Amino acid sequence: MENFLNSLPKPVLAILVLVVAIIAFMIMSPPHSVCDTQADAFKELQKGNIFPTDYKKSKIPPTVVRAKEACQLGNSAGSCYEYFTILREVAEGVGKASAECTSQLYGINEVRSNLNDGIELMARLAWGTKPPEMGLERFGWMQDAEIAIFCRLKNIYTRANGEEAWTNFRKKVYEKFPGEELPPSADPALVAVEPRKATQVLSEQDIWNRSLFSVRCEVY
């Protein structure tokens, strides 16, 4: 190989070295795609919401962390307003991406984890501490505004991941729904009994009928 390289004219050798260098650079630094550009713009817009912001030499945690905690503790329209607003803004940001880039944007760790957590939390808050009755009770305290946000999240999820992934996702959430509410024990010395999950006492269809997942999103 060394003899072969030495036998090459210097101009040819220079071109060969340049080509190898370009190929190596492209492998190590792939070209910036349209989706990469959209992802970068999205991240910039969502700084402070789901991405931390830089202040001097420190990183300020995203607002979604505090907002989610407030929603979980308050479990009301007022306490969840900021959290749901952030989820809606993130979903709208992903929704503005071109069709071929939706999956890439949803696949960003901060996007996937926050939107998935948001969908699950909304469904669990609506469900409550025991299986709700069918009809309006399955929405809990949520009104049209909150349900519309849930439907927006569902739309973005299915657009990015497909209907089959959505079905599998909601089935996993079913496993976290409580199936019964046990009265508190009068004897503090007794070991608390773990209530059964919804999947242990209800059929899959019954859970769907009683949950936020059954909402007709075309209405919203």
Image (cartoon, rainbow, N blue to C red):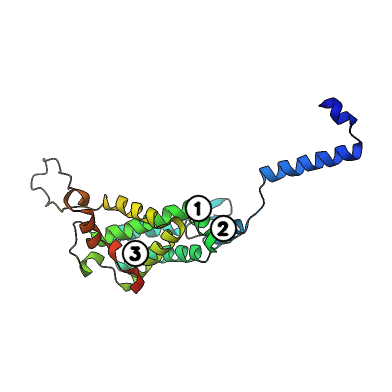
Label 3 vs 1, first from the N-terminus: 3
Indicate the amino acid at tag 3. Cys
Specify the quadrant of the image occupied by residue 124.
Answer: bottom left
Mark 3 is surrounded, within 10 Å at the Cα level, by few (under 14), some (14 to 19) or many (20 or more) other residues, namely many
Query: Hey, what amino acid is under mark 2?
Result: Ala
Name the residue tied to disc 2.
39
Residue denoted by label 3: 80
Q: Nearest to the eye among marks 3 and 2: give it.
A: 2
Give whichever of 204, 113 is nearer the camera. 204
Q: CA distance from mark 2 to mark 1?
A: 9 Å
97 on left or right of 5: left
Q: CA distance from mark 3 to mark 1?
A: 24 Å
Residue 149 percent across, percent down from the top left: 38, 67
How many numbered tags mark residues here? Answer: 3
Q: Nearer the viewer, residue 202 or 184?
A: 202
Q: Is residue 3 left or right of residue 44?
A: right
Q: Nearer the viewer, residue 67 or 193?
A: 193
Please give the label number shown on residue 108. 1
Q: Nearer the viewer, mark 3 or mark 1?
A: 1
Q: Residue at x 21, y 68 (%)?
A: 135
Q: 7 or 188: nearer the eye?
A: 7
**Number of other residues with Cα within 10 Å of mark 1, as a class: few under 14, some 14 to 19, many 20 or more:** few
Disc 3 from disc 2: Cα separation: 27 Å
What x and y, as percent, mark residue 5? 85, 30
**Which quadrant of the figure contains the N terminus?**
top right
Element at label 3: helix
